[in-house]
């Protein structure tokens, strides 16, 4: 995970996981709409996953 992507995950979580697949994008988008903090946490977890 690069520093730029981590900073972008804080400001706009769905944009950082757009290349990880449609499912990840939708999950992060829904969590961001429910609350900003859950969206940021989910985006950082998905970005940190090396699969």
Image (tube, helix red, strand yellow):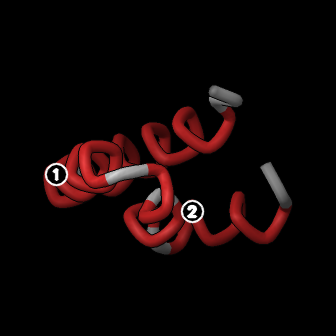
As measured in the structure, the alpha-carbon distance from the residue carrying label 1 to the one carrying label 2 is 15 Å
In the rendered image, the quadrant that contains the C terminus is top right
Of pointers 1 and 2, the one earlier in the residue sequence: 2
Q: Residues within 10 Å of mark 2 (few under 14, many from 20)?
A: some
**Who's the residue at 70% across and 30% down the image?**
50
> Residue 10, which numbered label?
2
Q: Is residue 51 above or below residue 33?
A: above
Q: Secondary structure at mark 1?
A: helix
Residue closest to the eye, 3 or 24: 24
Residue 28, percent from left and from top: 31, 50
Specify whether 34 is left or right of 47.
Answer: left
> Residue 30, which numbered label?
1
Q: Which residue is the extreme one toward the right?
A: 3
**Who's the residue at 57% across and 61% down the image?**
9
**Who's the residue at 35% across and 41% down the image?**
38
Residue 37, percent from left and from top: 40, 47
Q: Is residue 13 above or below residue 41?
A: below
Residue 45, percent from left and from top: 56, 33
Number of the front mark, 1 or 2: 1
Q: Secondary structure at mark 2?
A: helix
Residue 39, percent from left and from top: 36, 49
């Amino acid at each position: 995970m690069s520093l730029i992507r981590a900073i972008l995950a804080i400001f706009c979580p769905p944009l950082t996981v757009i290349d990880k697949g449609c499912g990840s994008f939708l999950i992060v988008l829904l969590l961001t709409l429910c609350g900003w903090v859950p969206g940021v946490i989910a985006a950082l977890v998905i970005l940190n996953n090396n699969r």
